[in-house]
Amino acid sequence: MNHLRLRRRGGRTTVLAALAAIVLVPTMASAAVVTVRAAAPGRTAAAQQLPTSEGQLIAVVGDISCAPTNPVYRGGEGSPAGCRQDSVAAQLAGQRLAAFLPLGDLQYEDGRLDEFVNVYDQFFGPYKAISRPIPGNHEYKTADGQGYYEYFGAAAHKDNPYGVPGSYSYDVGSWHLIAINSIMCAPITPCTPTSNMIKWLKADLAAHPNRCTLAYWHHPLYSLGHHGAYAPMTPVWNTLYDAGVDVILTAHDHNYQRFMPLGRATAIDDTTMAPPAEMPESQGMRTWIVGTGGANNYGLADDHPDVEQVTEAKYAGSSAALFGVLFMRLRDGGYDWDFQQAQPANIPFSDSGVGTCR
């Protein structure tokens, strides 16, 4: 699968030295032991931004609520293997959040309105006012994502001036955030340079020349997980990279993965990517997969050595599953991240660090 030689500009040592963090990468046989900080009690119903000098806190996770028909749903309490949306939602309580970013596949199995109202809303409804969602493939199992758009209303941005439903942007402090509906980029509806998606993205990026920019969508371009690469997002990735975007957040694969800063991408075909190009932090986009919202875990494949070598943190386990939220504090010129497990935690794993904008 090594169609292209991996280009290394700035070695792994240089990249890791730029991170003010100690991160261990666990496997099923050996898990890293890192301190996990418990969330404070309480409820957050509206954005509460901290002073700019301290940065703004956002919470990020996708692949969330089981349907009540799932045999381990158990009123939302779930089991060690899945349906843990209750304990994941509890992590948001008492946090001074500027925004909550749900990364798609928010309500299984079909994203119907009644499922959103009866399940997702029961746990994440208190944070609806600060939610900045994007849809996933399960939302579109209901025609045109109707249940998702009806539940979130104006916050879902069904009407986009460029005809790209579910895509929008906004600012959090000094940062610009771009929410992208990756369902709109598919083999049968490619996001070519002349597509509405790319036209909208270029216009939005030109209108918001913030030093720090974060983009998020559902389907990851690179992944060690069950779903693998989603090559149709390559034009979106490259448009963001060329504009100097700093952080990419995705879900879809039900596990946790964090990659080192990466450069421009090349798609071989609709399902295959050329090896990712490792870059120094000053030249690359750091990307995450945070599919730990409660549904279940998918395993990690061992047939993508090119992706493995640019992976800095990962965990997935079908029985001892990982669930939790990625908290990010967005500061002027940089950011901190801290993945915290839902309690009770199944395994001893956490991932935290510091990044600098390009």
Image: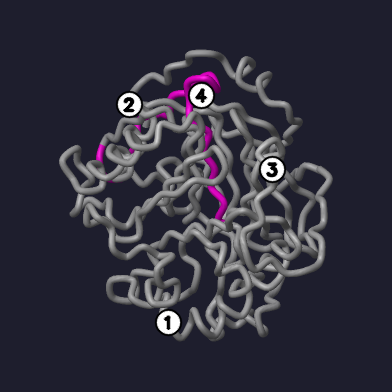
**Cβ atoms at labels 2 and 1 below 8 Å apart:** no
Label whose residue precedes the other's in the sequence (3 or 4): 3
**Disc assigned to residue 171:** none
Q: Earlier in the sequence, mark 2 or mark 4?
A: 2
Q: CA distance from mark 3 to mark 4?
A: 22 Å
Prevailing SS of the magenta stretch: loop
Judged left or right of residue 168, residue 82 is right
Examine the structure image and report whether residue 290 is included in the region drawn in magenta: yes
**Magenta region:** 269-291
Q: Which numbered disc flags the more N-terminal residue, 3 or 2?
A: 2
Expressed as whole percent of the image width and height from the top left, the position of residue 67 reads 53, 80
Q: Nearer the viewer, mark 4 or mark 1?
A: 4
Return the residue at label 3. Answer: 51
Give the SS element for disc 4. Answer: loop
Q: Are marks 1 and 3 in contact (CB under 8 Å)?
A: no
C-alpha gap between disc 2 and disc 1 = 44 Å
Mark 2 secondary-structure assignment: loop
Instruction: Determine which residue is flagged by label 4.
Output: 358
Q: Which residue is mark 1?
A: 113
Determine whether, in the image, residue 40 is placed left or right of residue 187. right
Closer to us: 293 or 302: 293
